[in-house]
Image (cartoon, helix red, strand yellow):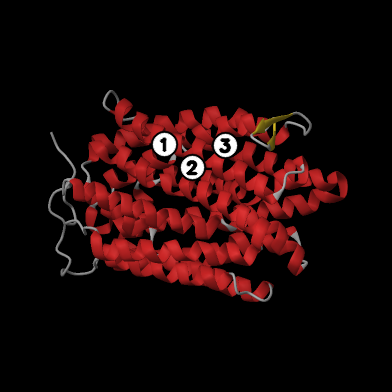
Amino acid sequence: MKTSAYGWRSHYTLLVLLFVYTMSFIDRQIMGILIQPIKEEFQVSDTAMGLLSGLTFALFYGVLAIPFGRYADRANRRNFVAYCCAAWSAMTALCGMATGYWSLALARVGVAVGEAGGTAPSLSMIADHYPPEQRGRAMGVYWLGPQLGILFGLTLGGWIAQHHGWRAAFLWMAAPGILAALMLRYTSVEPRRGMWDGEAPPVSGPVESLGVIVRSLWASKVFMRIGLAGLLMGFTGYGIGIWTPSFLVRSHGMSLQGAGAVMGLLGGTAAALGALLGGWLCDTLAKRDPRWRIGVPLLGCLLSLPTGLGFYLMPAGDVWHLGSLAMPAAVGWYLLFGVTAVWWVAPVYAVLSELIAPHRRATALSIFSLGLTMVGGGLGPLLVGLLSDALTPWMGTEALRMSLAITTGSCFALGIAAFAWAIKAYADERRS
């Protein structure tokens, strides 16, 4: 029975990488809960905030992800991720010192530059710590990062912003990232490359050209089809993460603290459960039929489409209470949506780690992340903001509600088709 590469040290390293990724996502997504006060202080439009929270970040993140991934394929990944974590945490602190829209934009660029070196090398490390049959669960643990980031970042970020202002939220969230960087650098394990995949080419050998890697990925039907599905999921996911707190404030009359509790405490918990469940279902069902590695994301999209639309389209009015906090009844749909909407993530990265050779894994995952971030993170929040502004003359404060419903429904419907299209290609590529 195969076990993790370095015993308990593999599990410890996985948890430290989870901590690093959680801080990455907190620093990335905290803009979601702070959009409203920043918009009001700087007197800018929804489109401008969508540009700041989406395209500005994604452009620099995406451009640097590939060269950083190529470097990580030949360098010590642990050290590189640790240095990047320290850098993006420092830039998050500078966001709290911004004096205007453009100084905040420059600080967000710095966050993006640091975070460009985080995810792909971390996923490459995890693939070398665990054998293929355990990677779904290991990836599921790592992909708790966004959910924990939402849980702690938006819940605490909303509370801090409510009581101490939005600048304090950035400053307070920077410190744990420095701690995460130190823990990764000095206490975790850099695994041997290709541990479970045969002998990888030596790190000191000739550098494989980027063109060779890109042509190989382009020729892979499963990579291209999963990539399309990932673009759609990233597009709607980033839009939801950035704009849902503002939707709760505008359409349901919630406070920043209340919206942060919904997105963080409730939504983050539901999504964390979903991330673990998706990884477990992937590994368990794939023992019967490997096609379930893509079937699980397809099932998640099928379940998420009606619940996501239910959340955004349910009218304001009815409430239920969580302690002293009044919750819109629509939040019930959001909890169901949160559990299944993340089922695609761990299985997709487990599939990609299986199909991509170890010596090019960080580069290939960076290329995948480039599309996910540029299209999803860059255009998702921006399109939601543009559509909201366009609908405002007719719908007023309900324009954001309709914008989110349109983008969420469309992307999940197309995602269902894309994952279904990828299943046969995956089965064929495994047999070849």
For discs 1 and 2, the disc positioned in front in the rendered view: 2
Residue at the location (19% across, 56% down)?
191
Distance from disc 1 to disc 2, alpha carbons, whole Å, reads: 9 Å
Quadrant where the C terminus lies?
Answer: top left
Lower sequence index among marks 3 and 2: 2
Crowding near the residue tagged with mark 3, few <14, some 14–19, many ≥20 C-alpha atoms within 10 Å? many
x 51%, y 60%: residue: 27
Image quadrant where one finds the N terminus: top left
Residue drawn at 63 percent across, 40 percent down: 408
Which residue lies under the disc numbered 1? 422
Front one among 3 and 358 = 3
Is residue 370 toward the left or the right of residue 363 in the image? Answer: right
Residue 367 lies, in percent from the top left, at 40, 58
> Regarding mark 3 in the picture, which secondary structure is present there?
helix
Residue farthest to the right? 393
Which residue in the structure is indicated by mark 3?
Answer: 412
Q: Position of residue 327 (x, y in %)?
A: 68, 35
- Is 266 above or below relative to 149? above
Can residue 134 be seen in the rendering of this structure?
yes
Q: Is 256 on the left or on the right of 89, as rendered?
A: right
**Mark 2 residue type:** Ala
Q: Viewer-nearest of labels 1 and 3?
A: 3
Counting residues from the N terminus, which is met first, the one under dot 1 or under dot 2? Answer: 2
- Distance between the alpha carbons at the discs numbered 1 and 3: 15 Å
- Around disc 2, counting alpha carbons within 10 Å, would you say few (fewer than 14), some (14 to 19), or many (20 or more)? many
Vertical comparison of 31 with 327: above or below: below
The amino acid type found where label 1 is placed reads: Ala
Asked whether disc 3 touches disc 2, contact meaning CB atoms under 8 Å apart, the reply is: no
Question: Do callouts 1 and 3 mark residues in contact (Cβ within 8 Å)?
Answer: no
Cα separation, mark 3 vs mark 2, equals 9 Å
Please give the residue where the numbered disc 2 appears in the rendered image: 229
